[in-house]
Image (spheres, rainbow, N blue to C red):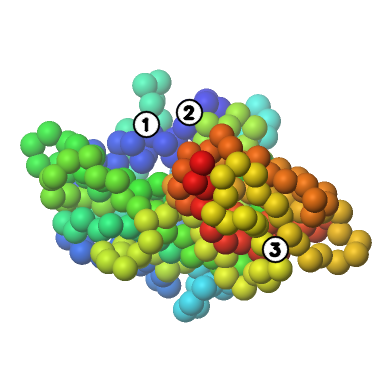
Amino acid sequence: MICILRLLSLFLFANSFFLLPVNAQSTIPNAGFEEWEASTAGPFFEEPAGWFTANQFVPFAWEPQAEKVTESYSGLYALAIENKSQPFSFGEVVLAGWAQLGQVDSIEMTQNGAFIQGRINEGFTDRPISFGGFFKYLPTKLPDTCTIIFRLMDTVGTVSIVGEAIFQYTGLPVADFTDFVAEVEYFNDSIPNILSIYMSSSSNSDPDIMVGSRLIVDELSVRSEGAPPTGVASISGAENNVQLFPNPAQDRVQVAFDLPANAQGVHVSLYDLTGRVVLQQQVLTPAQQLDVSSLNPGTYIYKVASLSEATLHGSGKLIVTN
């Protein structure tokens, strides 16, 4: 039973095309999470309109794993999903928080998995170049990973995945709303007719899901032009008192930083343009260097945070030419 519950959200996402369609849409429904409605879970639970979350499948005694919060990027509200420890007759089980676009009316757990009845978002026929929005991520401890998956499908004839964009973040807490953009990778030339979006506050494949890891999301959007093809968040509001040089670099990079006298050094994270972590290293003195000789030539995003307070002090782009 523990395994079924941990994999439930992945089952929903992977099999969402077996649900009945809702009315046609050409944009992401309730992308700013301003509209909320009563949940089937009970009078104290709310759901973002047009979405379903873990709240709809939990007993009344459980704590909500998806909530309406007022710490929004814009408007009045945003969506927060969080890992929670929930009571079972045999003990506590930690479940990842999750939310998915669409609506589920009922779910029946069987020995073979889950039988789902509900509605999904049919009629999305665009082929955008990227998908994005704004997020905060507050992992309980490192490492932990939040995931947002944007998927376009074609159900005319044989069901197929037309395109997909995946944003994942593993690293230090992101306490301020930060823009993320993920390029849509297309697998064929079909025109999609179904849009599915799945978000999780922790990795469902991790057997040790961490209680309290929290993902807050607001203002989702698709971008048809003018958006950079990157799944790495661009940090806004950070004091850029850190510099990596030389830039472009061939094999080694020096980290110049100006931190308070009591700082113990910095933690440097390097990401490729899909959001994958390719290098992480502690730098204790400005004389210490990063070895980038094993990286493929290209553009990378760096983030530098202090070791003592896990505070972000700078971010930017590093070009590797080796």
Determine whether, in the image, residue 271 is placed left or right of residue 104: right
Q: CA distance from mark 1 to mark 3?
A: 50 Å
- The numbered mark, 2 or 3, whose residue comes first in the sequence reads 2
| Furthest residue toward top | 111
Determine whether, in the image, residue 146 is placed left or right of residue 113: right
Task: Note whether 185 is above or below 225 in the view shown.
Answer: above
Picture quadrant where residue 109 is located: top left
Q: Is the Cβ of the residue at disc 2 closer than 8 Å to that at disc 1?
A: yes
Picture quadrant where residue 209 is located: top right
Q: Nearer the viewer, mark 2 or mark 3?
A: 3
Instruction: Check residue 114 in the rendering and tell me which mark sits there, or answer none.
Output: 1
Disc tally is 3
Q: Position of residue 84 (x, y in %)?
A: 63, 45
Task: Note whether 255 is above or below 114 in the view shown.
Answer: below
Q: Is the Cβ of the residue at disc 2 closer than 8 Å to that at disc 3?
A: no
Task: Note whether 248 is above or below 206 in the view shown.
Answer: below
Of the pair 176 and 24, the residue shown nearer to us:
176
Look at the numbered disc 3 and give the secondary structure of its residue.
strand
Q: Is the Cβ of the residue at disc 1 closer than 8 Å to that at disc 3?
A: no
